[in-house]
Image (cartoon, coloured by chain):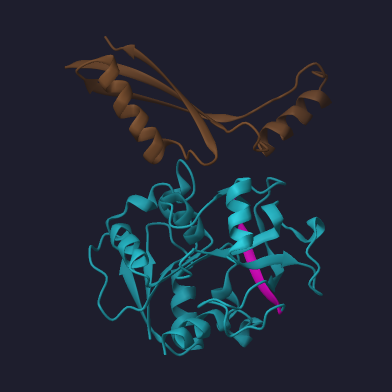
Chain colours: A brown, B cyan
Amino acid sequence: MNKYKANIKITLREGILDVQGKTVEHALHSIGFESMSAVRIGKFVTLEIKAESETAATYQIENACKQIIANPIIEDYSIEITKAE
Amino acid sequence: MKFGIVVFPGSNCDHDAYHAASVNAGFGAQYLWHKDTLIPDDIDCIILPGGFSYGDYLRCGAVAQFSPLMKEVKKFGESGKYVVGICNGFQILTETGMLPGALLKNENLNFICKDTNLKVISNDSAFTSAYNKGDIINIPIAHGEGNYYADDDTLKMLEDENLIVFKYSSPDGIIEKQYNPNGSVNNIAGIISKKGNILGMMPHPERYSDTQLGCDDGISIFKSIARSLS
């Protein structure tokens, strides 16, 4: 068994209005960062997992994302896996 | 007629729902602990009450769906028996997939606690038969994430199959953006499942089921359910 570390990034799906992102964008503009746009806010989850291989680890994390970590109706997610020390 | 009210860690409208179902509407009611693995045989309708189950960690309703009793609630719903999700309960129902769509943060990012006018879009359901179609009822909301979202296909299905039961409206029934408190698509406040046995709504009928609290417009939901069982 190997140990892996996963970074999971969750954001609202494209096309869904991100009201938090919009609010932060307005705040950025109001303090002089007018050149910034398309602000979107998400969640960041890290976890460790024991698995036979990186493929096996990714498979399990994908399943976890679909079942609980993200809500696929409104959220997209991306997984980044590295081998833990 | 007996209601079973599920109590999750963080539920805070369970007692209101119990009071509305028993004292106000005059039916049987019983609390069901979320760790139970059995729904008693005499329960006719499950209520998933409002509150902040599991602290709303990760997403509202995301963790509650994995409580042991929720497995039974899913089976209960699949068998055609009645399930009502109010506020956090509605969020749990969408997270489990028992109802379509999802609840996003309110468009203005505020937690909104106020009375709202709801138009009864359909009284052709087990939950709204004691109202008249087009009735305007006063029911309070209290949520930070009640902005109903569904993709275009789902929305069309909900409209075509008459599954939207309540929409936010003006006091005289006008359904426009300005009367929409939270940004919900098409002003949707409550929907039912395809089979018609599961209701999810963000407003709190149990809080307005007692004239001593100023209004009892919500009590007809409890009465409708009993009527459809008799």
Out of B146 and A67, give the one closest to the viewer.
Answer: A67
Q: Residue at x 60, y 45 (%)?
A: B151
Quadrant housing the N terminus of chain A: top left
Q: Position of residue B125 (x, y in %)?
A: 54, 76
Out of B53 and B197, give the one closest to the viewer.
Answer: B197
Q: Please count the marks in the image.
A: 0
Q: Residue furthest front?
A: B160
Residue B141 in the magenta stretch? The answer is yes
Q: Residue furthest left?
A: A1
Out of B181 and B53, give the one closest to the viewer.
Answer: B181
B101 shown above or below B200: above
- The answer to whether any part of residue B164 appears in the image is yes
Residue B102 in the magenta stretch? The answer is no
Magenta stretch secondary structure, dominant:
strand
Start-end of magenta stretch: B135-145
Q: Is B199 displayed left or right of A49 in the figure?
A: right
- The answer to whether any part of residue B146 appears in the image is no
Quadrant housing the C terminus of chain A: top left
B101 shown above or below A39: below
B199 shown above or below B155: below
Q: Residue at x 61, y 29 (%)?
A: A41
Q: Position of residue B32 (x, y in %)?
A: 32, 69
Q: Position of residue B74 (x, y in %)?
A: 34, 60
Out of B152 and B230, give the one closest to the viewer.
Answer: B152
Q: Residue at x 24, y 16 (%)?
A: A3
B126 shown above or below B167: below
Q: Position of residue B52 (x, y in %)?
A: 48, 55
